Amino acid sequence: MKTAYLSIYTLTMNDIQKIDKVEKNLTGRIDKLGKSLAYLEDDAPTREEFDNLEDRVDKVE
């Protein structure tokens, strides 16, 4: 059985595979969150658009 040494702990290849699986899962989740945040930023009005909203509301009233 192959082992890797990390500090005082001995990890088996099975342990390393589990860690890799968790890392890939977390990386995927972080990527999804980043994409969601990017889409939210794209939908948010710019400062100029936000400032012009008051003018548009006044015109409607």
Image (spheres, rainbow, N blue to C red):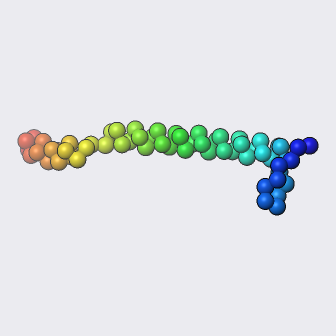
* Residue 28 appearing in the image: yes
Which residue is at 92% across, 43% downward?
1
Q: Is residue 8 above or below residue 1?
A: below
Residue 9: percent from left, percent from top: 82, 58
Residue 53: percent from left, percent from top: 17, 44
* Nearer to the camera, 15 or 29: 15
Residue 22: percent from left, percent from top: 69, 45
Residue 51: percent from left, percent from top: 17, 48
Q: How many marks?
A: 0
Q: Quadrant of the C terminus?
A: top left
Q: Is residue 25 left or right of residue 60?
A: right
Which residue is at 11% across, 45% downward?
55
Residue farthest to the bottom?
Answer: 8
Q: Is residue 39 left or right of residue 2?
A: left
Which residue is at 83% across, 43% downward?
13
* Residue 57 appearing in the image: no
Q: Is residue 1 left or right of residue 49?
A: right
Which residue is at 27% across, 43% downward?
45
The image quadrant of residue 30 is top right
Q: Is residue 40 left or right of residue 12?
A: left
